[in-house]
């Protein structure tokens, strides 16, 4: 059963989902907007994919233990990622129901349709809501790549079948590195999501020569750019959280970024 959803709005978009009996969607805590009275809301610590097969009451004590361990592990991963520990689940009873969700920043939303063939990876603040048939997980880039890329260290991973709704700041652009010689270089804070099969990396901007230092100190990008290679969809956003925060601070009489550009700053989302 395909999720019926409509993205509405312009400067700050929202999604309105129509639920049929037996259909469930879940969202990250804080993304819920409104619902009709026949839609139930339940808060849980685990998302789809957090319980191992064979768990639950039917698995006896060992199944209950696996379920508890799976829930604790997923909650721990989300805590390490700096995300909310809980998910909110919504289901319609007694007929068709409606529920609405929104992101937390002015910008676009996008509905991704998973068919089971490819996973999607999203930066850790992008997730809004998904069908219960979509499994949620945390992917860690780790090592030097993760530390250099800032938000690239922690990614949210979506697998299975169904609709995933993501949000970002500003406007979206869809690109495929294969259309540009197989590789694109991106401001690390502009990555919203990409398909499985895209290889993520981080590279230094130029060498430690005069021009390289000029790029880092006055170019606003710090020392690194993200690289995306392969054949698949990539979604970028036109605004970063850091850029929005700096613009607001400047409008209030301060300038967090200052003359050194992005050298001593860390991108966020």
Image (spheres, rainbow, N blue to C red):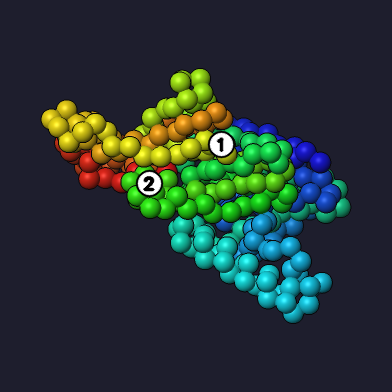
For label 2, the SS is helix
**The N terminus: image quadrant:** top right
| Real-space CA distance between mark 1 and mark 2, rounded to the nearest whole angstrom | 17 Å
Residue furthest bottom in the image: 61
Furthest-left residue in view?
Answer: 210
Q: Position of residue 48 (x, y in %)?
A: 67, 56
Q: Is residue 243 visible?
A: no
Question: Measuring 17% from the left and 28% from the top, which residue is drawn there?
Answer: 211
Q: Position of residue 174 (x, y in %)?
A: 53, 26
Q: Which disc, if any, is residue 197? A: 1
Nearer-the-camera pick, 150 or 88: 150
Residue located 22% across and 41% down the image: 263
Q: Nearer the viewer, residue 244 or 115?
A: 115
Using the image, determine if residue 124 lies above or below residue 199.
below
Horizontal side of 154 relative to 187 (left or right) equals: right
User: Which quadrant of the figure has residue 82?
Assistant: bottom left
| Quadrant where the image shows the C terminus | top left
Residue behind mark 2: 145
Residue 193 in sight here: yes
Residue 87: x and y in percent read: 61, 58
Rendered location of residue 110, percent (x, y): 59, 34
């Amino acid at each position: 059963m395909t999720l019926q959803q409509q993205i509405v709005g312009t400067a700050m978009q929202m999604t309105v989902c129509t639920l049929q009996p037996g259909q469930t969607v879940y969202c990250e805590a804080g993304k819920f907007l409104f619902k009709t009275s026949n839609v139930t809301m339940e808060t849980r610590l685990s998302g789809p994919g957090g319980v191992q097969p064979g768990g639950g009451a039917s698995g006896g004590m060992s199944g209950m233990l696996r379920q508890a361990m799976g829930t604790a592990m997923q909650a721990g991963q989300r805590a390490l990622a700096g995300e909310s520990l809980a998910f909110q689940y919504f289901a319609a009873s007694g007929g068709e129901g409606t529920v609405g969700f929104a992101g937390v920043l002015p910008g676009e939303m996008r509905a991704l349709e998973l068919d089971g063939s490819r996973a999607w990876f999203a930066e850790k603040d992008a997730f809004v809501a998904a069908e219960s048939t979509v499994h949620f997980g945390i992917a860690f880039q780790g090592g030097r790549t993760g530390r250099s890329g800032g938000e690239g260290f922690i990614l949210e991973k979506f697998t299975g079948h169904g609709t995933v709704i993501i949000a970002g700041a500003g406007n979206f652009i869809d690109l495929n590195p294969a259309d540009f010689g197989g590789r694109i270089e991106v401001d690390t804070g502009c990555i919203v999501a990409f398909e499985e099969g895209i290889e993520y990396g981080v590279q230094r901007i130029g060498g430690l020569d005069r021009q390289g230092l000029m790029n880092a100190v006055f170019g606003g990008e710090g020392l690194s750019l993200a690289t995306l290679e392969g054949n698949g969809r990539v979604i970028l956003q036109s605004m970063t959280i850091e850029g929005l925060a700096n613009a607001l601070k400047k409008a209030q009489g301060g300038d967090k970024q200052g003359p050194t550009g992005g050298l001593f700053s860390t991108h966020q989302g």
